Amino acid sequence: MAGSCFADILSELVDLTPGEQGALEKLEERQRHVRRGAVLQRENEAGGELFILRKGLMMSYVLLADGSRQILRFLFPGDMLGMSSVIYLEAPETLCALSDCVVSPFDRSVLSALFVDHPRLAALVLVYSKIERVALTDRLAALGRTSAKARVAALLLDLRNRLRATDKAVSNAFALGLTQEEIGDATGLTAVHVNRMLRQLEEEGMIARDSGRVTLLDERALARAANYVNRFERLDLGWLPKPA
C-alpha cells in the first residue's frame, strides 16, 4: 500500500503541498500487521509509539471499576492512533483490533520533527484532535440525555460517514463490522437492547439489514431521530498558518 492514509484524510480539509504530502508518507513507511482481537496498546502501560491505521477497524476503550468495558471511539483507516497517550507516561486507553488491520508505527520524536518542519500539519493534527473531541463530547451527552434509539441511530450514521471519508464507494449501504455487544459497549446499552433498537429502526423504515450489512433507507429521518451532527462539516479553517 503506497501513499499516506492520513494525508488522504487531511486533504479533505485542505490542499496539501507536495512537501506536506511527502512528510506524511514518511510516517507510514513502516507497516505492522495486527490480527483481529490483538491489543496494540494497553491501558496503563508505557508506550512511546504512535500509529496510523492503514487498513481495518479498531477501537479504543477503557475498563471500568466493575470490570465492564466502555468503548470510546471506533477507529478507521487514516486515523492517527495513540494521540491521547502522547502527553502521558502511561496510556490512558486500550487500542484493540476489531478486524485484521495494518498500522504504521512511528516514534513521538518523529511527530515532534514533523511539527517543527511543517507548522500547518501541526495545526491540522490539532484540528483533527478537536473534531474527535467534539464528536466524543456529543456521544457523552447522548449517553446521559438521549434515548437508546437515538444512540444507535447516531452510531450508524457516524460509522457510515467515517467509512465514506476514505472510501468514496461507500454510499448508504455498508458492512457493519461490529457485534451488538460492541455497539452496546459504545452506547451504554446491553446487547439485547441494541438488538431491540435495530429492529425498531427497521420496522420504522429507517434502515435495512442483510448478512451483516446495513442500508440507510431514510437518512433524514435517522438523523432527526439521532439528533446527529457530522462534526467533519461546517469547519472554519481560515486561521491555519501558511504551508512551509
Image: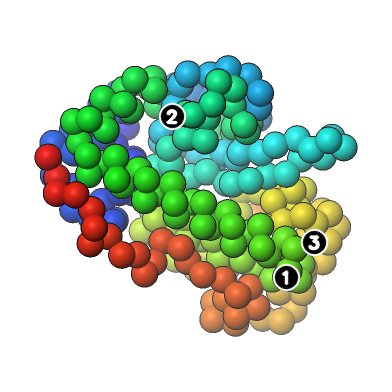
The circle drawn on residue 16 is none
- Of labels 1 and 3, earlier in sequence is 1
| 161 in relation to 66, above or below | below
Q: Which residue is mark 1?
A: 146
Q: Residue at x 75, y 35 (%)?
A: 63
Q: Nearer the viewer, mark 1 or mark 2?
A: 1
Q: Residue at x 69, y 51 (%)?
A: 186
218 with respect to 48 (left or right): right
| 198 in relation to 29, above or below | below
Q: Are marks 1 and 2 in contact (CB under 8 Å)?
A: no
Q: Residues within 10 Å of mark 3 (few under 14, many from 20)?
A: some
Q: Which residue is mark 2?
A: 51
User: Picture coordinates of residue 118 (x, y %)?
Assistant: 20, 36
Query: Looking at numbered disc 1 in the image, what kind of residue is underneath it?
Result: Thr
Q: Residues within 10 Å of mark 1 (few under 14, many from 20)?
A: some
User: Picture coordinates of residue 20 (x, y %)?
Assistant: 18, 38
| C-alpha span from label 3 to label 2 | 33 Å
Q: Nearer the viewer, mark 3 or mark 2?
A: 2
- Of labels 3 and 2, earlier in sequence is 2
User: Judging from the image, what secondary structure is the residue with disc 2 in?
Assistant: strand
Q: Are marks 3 and 2 in contact (CB under 8 Å)?
A: no
66 with respect to 239 (left or right): right
Query: Looking at numbered disc 2 in the image, what kind of residue is underneath it?
Result: Phe
| 50 in relation to 142, above or below | above
Q: Which residue is mark 3?
A: 195
